[in-house]
Amino acid sequence: MKICVLGAGALGCAIGGLLTEAGNEVWLVNRNADQVQAMNSRGLILRDAGVDRTVVVHAATTAAPVGVVDLVIVLVKSFHTVSAMSAATSLIGPDTVVLSLQNGLGHEDELAVIVGRERVLAGKTYVGGAQLAPGHVNIGYLGKDTHIGELDGGVSMRVQHIAAVFNAAGLETHVSDNIVGTMWDKLLINVATGALTGITRLTYGELYQRPELEACGVAAVAEAMAVAKASGVRLSITEPLQAWQKAGAGLPYEFKTSMLQSLEKGSVTEIDFVNGAVLRQGAKCGVPTPVNQTLVACMKGIEHGLADGARLFR
């Protein structure tokens, strides 16, 4: 299968590298020239369970050299979805499928406007990736499943084929007939740890040593679950503690959330599409969300400091 990973940061490289090793033609598109140059000059280095290995990959800063593909995996930051996909329509052919594996909610609607709703699949993944250096990524995928599905809840041949390709690469992947619930399940995972690690600057291992932080994360998840229930969403997670436990399960001690990685790079985070999505939906259905509101406010304060040039992360 010819695949383009649109937004090949840490997670995109983790998934793209494994798919490449399984024999697929994978293109990793990242606007960061240093990342692309490193991968093209000496390959993508995957650190797996503490051991490095090199994968020969195709990498580019734009979609221009890629051509039409069978599958586009969208992994750009949520706030770049429209601009990134609009600049990459050359990837789209008659049978191209576009799969979002992004954090948060609402990307599928944005993608549908650009490429047509009939092409779009939704999905969520618990695979982890952390950038060590340009073209060098620490990956966590064992025991970390991925869920994909049609927007209408149907089980199609094309989504089953994509799942089979992922599974052949060692990416445990399931086809969901309740993709909205699946997306909310993943949202709960991000709600549990993302903002907390951004605020505290702690790795997963450090975070899970602090019971007071666990209590805060679990409370944020409980609010999100109440919002989902009020919205008629069917979740597979039944207790808030499950989301907290699943968020860090199987990841190395030194792993960092994508929100913390963004702040360390001096960029804004996806807080508006994670905890912020809980706030917006909670307001619509009349469910109070004070813990998530506080987490969003703290993250916005940190982002504001970064925008003003403050050296908050050293």
Image: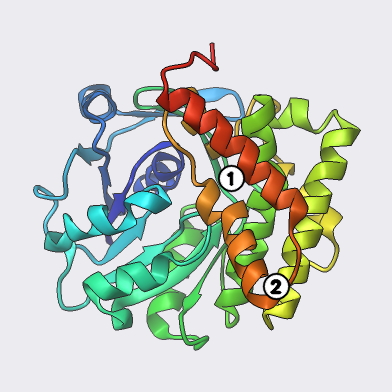
- Distance between the alpha carbons at the discs numbered 2 and 1: 27 Å
Q: Residue furthest right?
A: 211
In the depicted structure, whether residue 255 falls above or below residue 167: above
Q: Nearer the viewer, residue 140 or 6?
A: 6
Instruction: Name the residue that disc number 2 marks.
Output: 228
Disc marking residue 221: none
Q: Position of residue 236 (x, y in %)?
A: 74, 71
For the point 21% across and 77% down, the residue is 95
- What secondary structure is found at the residue carrying circle 1? loop
Placement of the C terminus among the 4 image quadrants: top right
Q: Nearer the viewer, residue 206 or 23?
A: 206
- What secondary structure is found at the residue carrying circle 2? helix
| 104 horizontally vs 189: left or right | left
| 135 horizontally vs 180: left or right | left
Total number of numbered labels? 2
Of the numbered discs 2 and 1, the one sitting upstream in the chain is 1
Res 31 quadrant in image? top left
For the point 27% across and 74% down, the residue is 113
Instruction: Name the residue that disc number 1 marks.
Output: 141
| 72 horizontally vs 133: left or right | left
Q: Nearer the viewer, mark 2 or mark 1?
A: 2
Q: Position of residue 250 (x, y in %)?
A: 71, 41
Q: Position of residue 253 (x, y in %)?
A: 71, 27
For the point 21% across and 23% down, the residue is 41
Please indicate, yes or no, whether residue 103 appears anywhere in the rendered image: yes
Amino acid type for the residue under numbered disc 2:
Ala
Amino acid type for the residue under numbered disc 1:
Tyr
Res 158 quadrant in image? bottom left
Q: Position of residue 208 (x, y in %)?
A: 81, 33
The type of colouring in the image is: rainbow
| 254 horizontally vs 10: left or right | right
